[in-house]
Amino acid sequence: MILPTVPPHLPHLPIYRKALEIVSLSRSISSYLHYDLCELEPDGSENAHIYFSGDIVQQSVSLAPEIVKAEQEVYPEQKHKHLAALSKLTHNLYANCIRLERSKSNGRDYLKILRKELHAFKRLQRAWMLSL
């Protein structure tokens, strides 16, 4: 999933590769959770956790484009804007993983793997932000 306007050095950056891994992992987890969470509750209502499974995909898909935007930005103020957006996405993604772990799904154990990958991504993110 390399974006068409990606600079040639970007696919070799560890943070970019980790972002792509997180996209793949979150999509797999979301599709696995979907089957458990799409069933209606005993009272006929839908499971509220199903929306969080979509959120983790949406947020993880947004990670790589924010990295690209920050790398391509010339002005420091705009770089910081993209870095802040990336930090917020990472935080929200982590929070949604925790919310989904509270669901009644067999796949919630896989969310621990995603949270571990997010933790590694945050470490890479800190180092990368200092290099910009």
Image (cartoon, rainbow, N blue to C red):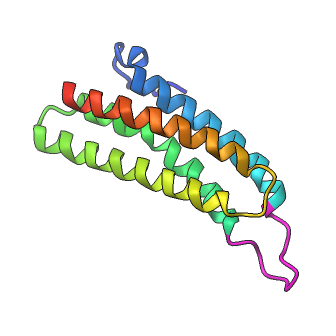
* Residue 75, x across and y down, in percent: 11, 37
Residue at image position (64%, 59%) is: 100
Residue at image position (77%, 75%) is: 46
Q: Report the side of 119 relative to 109 (left or right).
A: left
> Magenta stretch: dominant SS?
loop
Residue at image position (72%, 51%) is: 108
Q: Is residue 62 above or below residue 5?
A: below
Does any portion of residue 132 appear in the rendered image?
A: no
Q: Quadrant of residue 49?
A: bottom right
Q: Report the side of 41 relative to 111 (left or right).
A: right
* Residue 8, x across and y down, in percent: 36, 13
Q: Is residue 39 above or below residue 117?
A: below
Quadrant of the rendering where the N terminus is positioned: top right
Nearest to the observer: residue 120 or residue 65: 120
Q: Is residue 40 above or below residue 44?
A: above
Quadrant of the rendering where the C terminus is positioned: top left
129 drawn magenta: no
Residue at image position (59%, 40%) is: 114
